Image: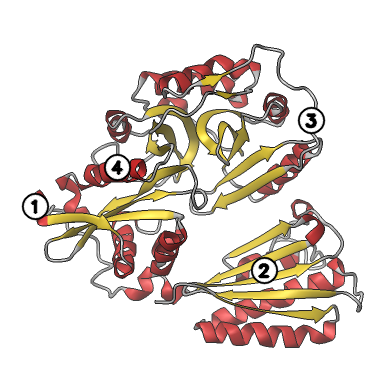
């Protein structure tokens, strides 16, 4: 199994005459990667559109300019990065093309064709280094359904197999387990989980790079029964989310889920983490109760975090709206007391949440927050999770341009029809309170807090519902804190005031 990507690049003059040479280079690599002919045609279309836009619009047909194509091949996808230092532009302001538009109106057609042809299209502003357009195409035959026979795709049997606990072991994942983990996810969730889990090579890559630490349960005869993992926002992060947890349906009644979660908690402690997080569904209280019994304390609620087609069978049946999640945190150590700067209206709730998590913080009195921005460089990161149709924005450092950058990102994500945007603000920065008030002005409202959740700094979480309606009566909180949080968040929601 290939453990790393193959990367090649070429730098090309900004001339249309080189378009066919660029296409030939990319398409030959695509054939080498193993794409089918129809997929190669789609890549060809996207590359032609992207390169044409760079030459004509980004570099304004200047033959003295150059741009660089970087191709990265992995076991399960191809990433094509086009880098140039042309005219700045805001991708959120690109015209939106509709197939129903009049024939003579082709505004935005190029971007539309790229998005239709590729699995991901990302624009990255690199400041003084220019811009990067990243096109991603996944190898469908490397996805797990391309490696399963028809029998393995059949619905699981209704009855549970009975095994005594002594007949299985829990251990760290090895590369050979990955394909069975993907099959297990498929059998448990179909294709409603995050995309990477259906590519065995990605599971191995994430474990190798430090983005995941997986545990598997394996029966005495070698059958993989279940999987769970610590998920890290970046390698060597101080906190991790307990998740990616699923058990084959026939092993559901053996208590494997709890065993895996408990072992992950032990693993997190042994790694020296500050703590672990969990997100429990709110259609029923069972998973919330489990987290509470393990010592986790609720600290936020993500509205509309999961798909609307989840089926909890006898527990709650099918969900009637996008499922919300209760965020909880289990603290492993007592870090030094930190100063926090939440907006005045949330000061008491923030104090309460950190107190219940037994994490020491100091919150200055009202009026002590800094009212002007700093000269530090602005730091904003954003990402989307397509299968959940949600997005996250992380703000670490603030200056006079930070809110405008945030608003541009917010506009772009709204145009992509993302349901919910979760905003993580560095609450240890004295400018947080003022910045949060600005965000409230465009519709963000309280979601919760996350210790060490903003690049090692304690985070204030806000959320924005993008034309998503939430029936709060369908949310079933378990703990008193979660019950109070639901009421508090509903009162903050601008659509419910």
Residue at 69% x, 63% y: name it: 99
**SS of the residue under disc 1:** helix
**SS of the residue under disc 2:** helix
Q: Is residue 341 left or right of residue 265?
A: right
Q: Residues within 10 Å of mark 1 (few under 14, many from 20)?
A: few
Instruction: Check whether the beta carbons of the residues at disc 4 and disc 2 lie within 8 A of each other.
Output: no
In this view, 303 is above or below 307: above
Residue 114's tag is 2
Mark 3 vs 1, N-terminal side: 1
Mark 4 vs 2, N-terminal side: 2
Q: Quadrant of the N terminus?
A: bottom left
Mark 4 vs 1, N-terminal side: 1
Q: CA distance from mark 4 to mark 1?
A: 20 Å
**SS of the residue under disc 4:** helix
Q: Which residue is mark 4?
A: 266
Residue 373's tag is 3
Q: Residues within 10 Å of mark 4 (few under 14, many from 20)?
A: few
Mark 3 vs 2, N-terminal side: 2
Residue at 18% x, 64% y: name it: 223
In this view, the mark in front (1 or 2): 1
In this view, the mark in front (3 or 4): 4
Does residue 264 appear anywhere in the picture? yes
Q: CA distance from mark 1 to mark 2?
A: 53 Å
Residue at 23% x, 72% y: name it: 151
Q: CA distance from mark 3 to mark 1?
A: 60 Å
Q: CA distance from mark 3 to mark 4?
A: 42 Å
Q: Which residue is mark 1?
A: 166
């Amino acid at each position: 199994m290939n453990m790393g990507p193959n990367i090649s690049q070429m730098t090309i003059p900004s001339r249309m005459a080189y378009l066919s040479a660029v296409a030939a280079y990319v398409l030959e690599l695509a054939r080498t990667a193993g794409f089918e002919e129809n997929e190669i045609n789609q890549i060809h279309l996207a590359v032609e559109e992207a390169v044409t836009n760079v030459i004509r619009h980004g570099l304004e047909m200047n033959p003295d300019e150059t741009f660089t194509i970087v191709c990265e091949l992995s076991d399960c996808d191809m990433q094509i990065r086009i880098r140039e230092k042309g005219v700045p532009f805001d991708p959120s302001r690109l015209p939106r093309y509709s197939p129903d538009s009049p024939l003579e109106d082709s505004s935005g057609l190029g971007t539309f064709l790229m998005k239709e042809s590729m699995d991901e299209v990302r624009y990255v502003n690199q400041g003084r280094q220019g811009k990067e357009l990243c096109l991603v195409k996944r190898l469908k035959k490397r996805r797990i359904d391309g490696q399963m026979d028809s029998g393995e795709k059949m619905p699981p049997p209704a009855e549970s197999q009975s095994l005594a606990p002594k007949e299985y072991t829990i251990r760290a994942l090895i590369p050979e387990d990955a394909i069975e983990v993907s099959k297990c996810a498929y059998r448990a969730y179909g294709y409603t989980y995050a995309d990477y889990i259906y590519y065995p090579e990605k599971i191995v890559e994430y474990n190798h790079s430090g983005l995941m630490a997986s545990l598997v349960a394996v029966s005495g005869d070698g059958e993989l029964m279940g999987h769970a993992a610590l998920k890290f926002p970046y390698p060597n992060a101080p906190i991790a989310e307990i998740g990616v947890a699923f058990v084959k349906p026939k092993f559901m009644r053996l208590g494997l889920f709890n065993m895996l979660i408990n072992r992950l908690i032990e693993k997190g402690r042994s790694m020296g983490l500050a703590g672990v997080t969990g997100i429990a569904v709110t259609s029923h209280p069972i998973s919330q109760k489990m987290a509470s019994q393990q010592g986790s304390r609720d600290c936020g609620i993500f509205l509309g975090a999961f798909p609307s087609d989840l089926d909890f069978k006898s527990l709650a049946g099918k969900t009637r709206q996008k499922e919300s999640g209760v965020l909880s945190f289990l603290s492993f150590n007592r870090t030094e007391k930190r100063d926090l700067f939440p907006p005045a209206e949330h000061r008491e709730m923030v104090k309460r949440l950190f107190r219940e998590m037994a994490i020491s913080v100091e919150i200055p009195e009202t009026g002590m927050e800094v009212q002007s921005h700093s000269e530090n460089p602005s730091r904003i990161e954003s990402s989307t999770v397509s299968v959940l149709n949600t997005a996250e924005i992380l703000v670490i450092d603030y200056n006079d341009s930070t809110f405008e950058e945030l608003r541009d990102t917010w506009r772009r994500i709204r145009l992509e029809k993302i349901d919910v945007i979760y905003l993580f603000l560095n609450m240890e920065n004295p400018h947080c309170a003022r910045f949060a008030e600005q965000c409230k002005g465009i519709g963000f409202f309280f979601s919760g807090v996350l210790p060490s959740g903003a690049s090692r700094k304690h985070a204030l979480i806000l959320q924005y519902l993008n034309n998503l309606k939430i029936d709060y009566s369908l949310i079933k909180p378990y703990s008193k804190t979660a019950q109070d949080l639901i009421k508090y968040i509903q009162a903050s929601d601008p659509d419910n005031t």
